[in-house]
Amino acid sequence: MELVQGSGNIFRDLEMPNPELEHLRSTLAAQIINTLDKRKLSLREAGAETGINYTEFSRIRRAKLDGFTVDRLWKMLDLLGQTVDVKVKVHPAAKRARPAPAHF
């Protein structure tokens, strides 16, 4: 058995589409869950406090993040009294094989 160190982004390691976006969405969702747990809020209590249907919090707790945008998750954290700080680092993407130019 060979041990391979991950990159820190499971979505990239599994070569899933949009790995950075998925990593960000899952990080925000984890923070929502963490906030609910720390404050001992039930899903219904979180819904009542934020005005967001409790089923949305249920979907997040079950890691069903399809349909959740980054801004929606961010807003949910805001409504739970949390502030999100983001550090952006831009650098050239890794070299990828590029298709040959089309000839018309």
Image (cartoon, rainbow, N blue to C red):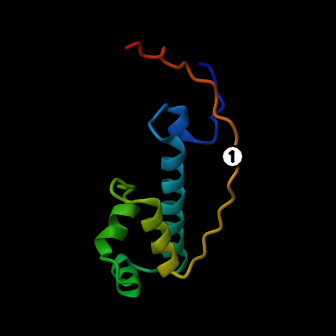
Q: Which is more toward the observer, 104 or 41? A: 104
Q: Residue furthest bottom?
A: 49
Position of the C terminus, as image quadrant, is top left
On the picture, is 3 further left or further right than 39? right
**Residue under numbered circle 1:** 90
**Residue 96 x/y as whole percent:** 57, 23
Residue at screen point 69% across, 59% down: 87
**Residue 82 x/y as whole percent:** 57, 77
Q: What residue type is disc 1 on?
A: Val
Residue at screen point 53% across, 68% down: 34
Relative to 29, does residue 99 appear above or below in the rendering?
Answer: above
Q: Which is more toward the observer, 45 or 103? A: 103
Relative to 19, does residue 49 appear above or below in the rendering?
Answer: below
Residue at screen point 40% across, 80% down: 46
Secondary element under disc 1, as helix, strand or loop, is loop
**Residue 12 x/y as whole percent:** 54, 36
Residue at screen point 39% across, 55% down: 63
Q: Which is more toward the observer, 37 or 48? A: 48
Q: How many numbered marks does the figure carry?
A: 1
**Residue 61 x/y as whole percent:** 40, 63
On the picture, is 66 further left or further right than 75? left
Give the quarter of the image for residue 72.
bottom left
Position of the N terminus, as image quadrant, is top right
**Dot 1 crowding, Cα within 10 Å, few <14, some 14–19, many 20+:** few
Relative to 47, does residue 55 appear above or below in the rendering?
Answer: above
